[in-house]
Amino acid sequence: MVENTLVQAGDIEFGNIKYLDYSKIGSGKSGLGLLKSEISDDFEFTEGSVGFARSTEFDSEDSEFFITLKEIPIYQGEYTPIGKVRFGLDILKKIKTGNKAIYVLRPDYINTFRMLEIN
């Protein structure tokens, strides 16, 4: 978690709660290949927005995603949007701030989530 800014998760390889590797967390792969960036100039990254994380290069999205805890206008047109958090944003704001250089005995993690289609 970047304090009061965003929560990032989805590192299947090194961020799995059963096989945490603090030295590599955030650099893991899903094993399913990279995705092409699908940028939208219309999607606004407001509080609760969900987007695919990527390296500094476009078309490098894999399994990692982020959830914004505040409006981040500079992300608009830069990251692939996935959706918006409708329920539970208050819980995400309680996740401990991370620093991968420091071992955390009981790290917070996202156990499950559901994608809903809301019209």
Image (spheres, rainbow, N blue to C red):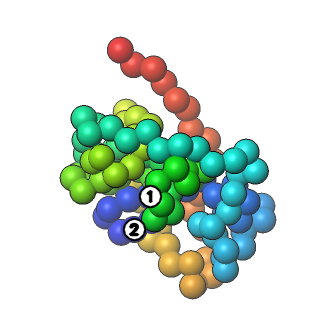
Q: Amino acid at mark 1?
A: Val
- Reply above or below: 30 against 28: above
Which residue is at a point 69% across and 57% down the rendered structure image?
A: 29
Taking the view exactly as shown, the residue that stands out farthest to the top is 119
- Are discs 1 and 2 less than 8 Å apart at CB? yes
Residue 102 is left or right of residue 47, and the answer is right
Task: Estimate the spatial distance between the alpha carbons at disc 1 and disc 2, rounded to whole Å.
Answer: 6 Å
**Which type of secondary structure does the marked residue at label 1 adopt?**
strand
Circle 1 crowding by C-alpha within 10 Å: few under 14, some 14–19, many from 20: many
Q: Quadrant of the C terminus?
A: top left
Relative to 95, is 111 above or below? above
What residue is rendered at 51% in x and 78% in y? Answer: 99
Q: Is residue 70 left or right of residue 34?
A: left
> Quick one: quadrant of the N terminus?
bottom left
Which residue, given by chain and number where applicable, does mark 1 sit on? 7
Residue 94: x, y in percent?
41, 59
Residue 17 falls in image quadrant: bottom right
- Marks 1 and 2, the one that precedes in the sequence: 2
Q: Is residue 53 visible?
A: no
Q: Quadrant of residue 3?
A: bottom left
Residue at 69% x, 47% y is 33
Please tell me which residue is depicted at 53% across the width and 43% down the height of the picture: 36
Farthest residue, direction bottom: 101
Q: x%, y% of residue 9?
A: 55, 56
- Residue 69 position, x and y percent, is 32, 54
Residue 10 % position (x, y):
60, 53
SS for tag 2?
A: loop
How crowded pointer 2 is (Cα within 10 Å; few <14, some 14-19, many 20+) is rated as some
Task: Give, as a three-letter code, the residue at label 2.
Answer: Val
| 93 relative to 85, above or below | below
Badge number at residue 2: 2
